[in-house]
Image (tube, coloured by chain):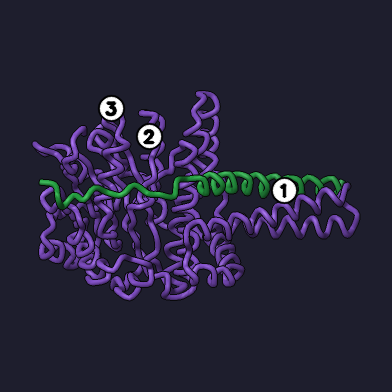
């Protein structure tokens, strides 16, 4: 990759019954400011029963229909498609993975290309994560709160990790890999947490970190109703709990014993509670201090009160400083006022989720989608998409 | 005994909270020091 010829790219869009949202998503890919001859859109219509494949064909995408009732799910679909792409006589230089409910900024592929060219190592390996935000953040407080959380988790933390030379991890959407990267490390189809597993395999097997491309932006639609949000949250929490239980401590030990900062940081990231749980823990701890000090149970009360005050200031510094750094919208700040209700809702979900026996869909890889609404064009304008992207 | 258990619980919760916040603030400070100017993509339309 020594000349300035743009890389040949394949944008891989795994889709399962995405007729409502796919057209707008493909439209955003069709109007990229990237030479049309240098990228191809491949839609994997996986076990679809709606018009997903027809919509993709009408948009000029290459469509691969896959029917496999035993191995269903995004991971299997990607594993299958990547194997086919690598087996082509002239495979692309790099592959980009984007969800079917996502809008890409018009310069998304151009920025991915620039980063891949700059950051691919001597072995030809490079893995990137673009900035993944919320498209419909003006459509209710849940989406706005999700947007604030995405600003912190999908932007501020990756930006910090990237600056420190650590792996930013993979977020499942808006990712890019050189061909050699995917040829060397296989994508996991049979995992609940395939993104995490792949990032860990890159670190373990190739000592390769995932870099961050903050200027390469994609936005996805988030649920606005309680029922939709509960379904999505349960699914994410299931995956997270599974990862923490199965991976975190062995990974931490492996990182320490082999002296690998990438693995230690990945383990710490897994062990870190989500912000809502951390906030709940902070409140619980402050209540313990308050009760303990007032009833003379805790020795050195000034020390405890000081520690509590430092933690409270740290929380505000992280949340408000992080949102400011991310250039969060007014809606995101306002949605923070609803955060206590969201925390209570999440605690309830966690409690009911732990009591409930995991469904087959939650314990094995599967397409379990959040109910969709058509991708909203007004939402795109409010998400801060560049003008060209609003004209779809 | 109960007081000791209370002290232990409070210390454990505090370690979790302060450790998590220290880690998050480290990442946030590093993010704040990240270069502001982002690399502009080449004008690829001009290329053959």
**Chain letter of the residue beneath label 3 in the structure image:** A
Residue assigned mark 2: A201
**Chain letter of the residue beneath label 1 in the structure image:** B
Of A169 and A228, nearer the camera is A169
Residue assigned mark 1: B14
Which element is circle 2 on? helix
Q: Which chain is green?
A: B
Q: Which chain is purple?
A: A
Q: CB atoms at circles 3 and 1 under 8 Å apart?
A: no
Tell me: A314 left or right of A89: right
Which element is circle 3 on? loop
- Mark 3 surroundings within 10 Å by alpha-carbon count, few (fewer than 14), some (14 through 19), many (20 or more): few
A102 is higher (above) or lower (below) than B42: below
Residue assigned mark 3: A123
Which element is circle 1 on? helix
A358 is higher (above) or lower (below) than A390: above
Instruction: Name the disc covering residue A120, or none.
Output: none
Mark 3 or 1, closer to the camera:
3
Residue at horizontal 53 percent and vertical 60 percent from the top: A324
Q: Quadrant of the C terminus of chain A?
A: bottom left
- Mark 2 surroundings within 10 Å by alpha-carbon count, few (fewer than 14), some (14 through 19), many (20 or more): some
The tag earlier along the polypeptide, 3 or 2, is 3
């Amino acid at each position: 990759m020594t000349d300035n010829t743009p890389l040949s790219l394949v944008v891989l869009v795994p889709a399962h019954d995405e007729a409502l949202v796919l057209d707008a998503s493909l439209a955003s890919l069709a109007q990229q400011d990237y030479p049309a001859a240098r990228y191809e859109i491949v839609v994997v219509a996986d076990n679809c029963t709606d018009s997903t494949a027809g919509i993709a064909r009408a948009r000029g995408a290459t469509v691969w229909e896959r029917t496999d009732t035993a191995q269903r799910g995004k991971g299997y679909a990607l594993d299958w498609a990547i194997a086919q792409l690598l087996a082509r006589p002239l495979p692309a230089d790099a592959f980009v993975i984007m969800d079917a409910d996502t809008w890409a900024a018009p310069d998304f592929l151009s920025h991915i290309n620039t980063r891949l060219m700059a950051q691919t190592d001597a072995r030809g390996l490079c893995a990137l994560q673009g900035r993944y935000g919320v498209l419909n953040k003006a459509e209710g407080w849940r989406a706005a709160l999700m947007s604030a959380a995405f600003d912190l988790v999908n932007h501020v933390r990756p930006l910090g990790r990237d600056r420190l030379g650590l792996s930013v991890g993979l977020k499942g959407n808006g990712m890019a890999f050189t061909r050699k990267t995917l040829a060397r490390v296989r994508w996991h189809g049979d995992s609940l947490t395939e993104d995490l597993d792949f990032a860990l395999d890159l670190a373990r097997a190739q000592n390769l970190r995932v870099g961050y491309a903050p200027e390469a932006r994609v936005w996805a639609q988030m649920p606005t109703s309680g029922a939709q949000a509960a379904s999505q949250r349960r699914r994410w929490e299931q995956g997270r709990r599974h990862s923490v239980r199965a991976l975190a401590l062995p990974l931490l030990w492996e990182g320490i014993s082999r002296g690998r900062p990438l693995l230690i940081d990945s383990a710490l990231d897994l062990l870190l509670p989500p912000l809502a749980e951390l906030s709940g823990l902070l409140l619980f701890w402050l209540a313990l201090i308050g009760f303990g000090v007032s009833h003379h149970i805790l020795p050195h009360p000034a020390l405890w009160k000081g520690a509590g005050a430092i933690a409270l200031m740290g929380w505000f510094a992280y949340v408000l400083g992080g949102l400011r750094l991310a250039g969060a919208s007014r809606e995101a700040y306002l949605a923070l006022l609803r955060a206590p209700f969201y925390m209570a809702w999440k605690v309830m979900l966690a409690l009911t989720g732990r009591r409930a026996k995991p469904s087959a869909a939650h314990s094995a890889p599967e397409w379990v989608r959040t109910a969709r609404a058509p991708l909203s064009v007004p939402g795109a304008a409010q998400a801060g998409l560049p003008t060209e992207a609003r004209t779809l | 005994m109960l007081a000791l258990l209370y002290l232990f619980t409070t210390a454990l919760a505090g370690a979790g909270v302060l450790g998590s916040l220290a880690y998050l603030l480290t990442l946030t400070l590093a993010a704040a020091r990240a270069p502001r100017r982002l690399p502009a993509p080449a004008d690829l339309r001009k290329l053959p």
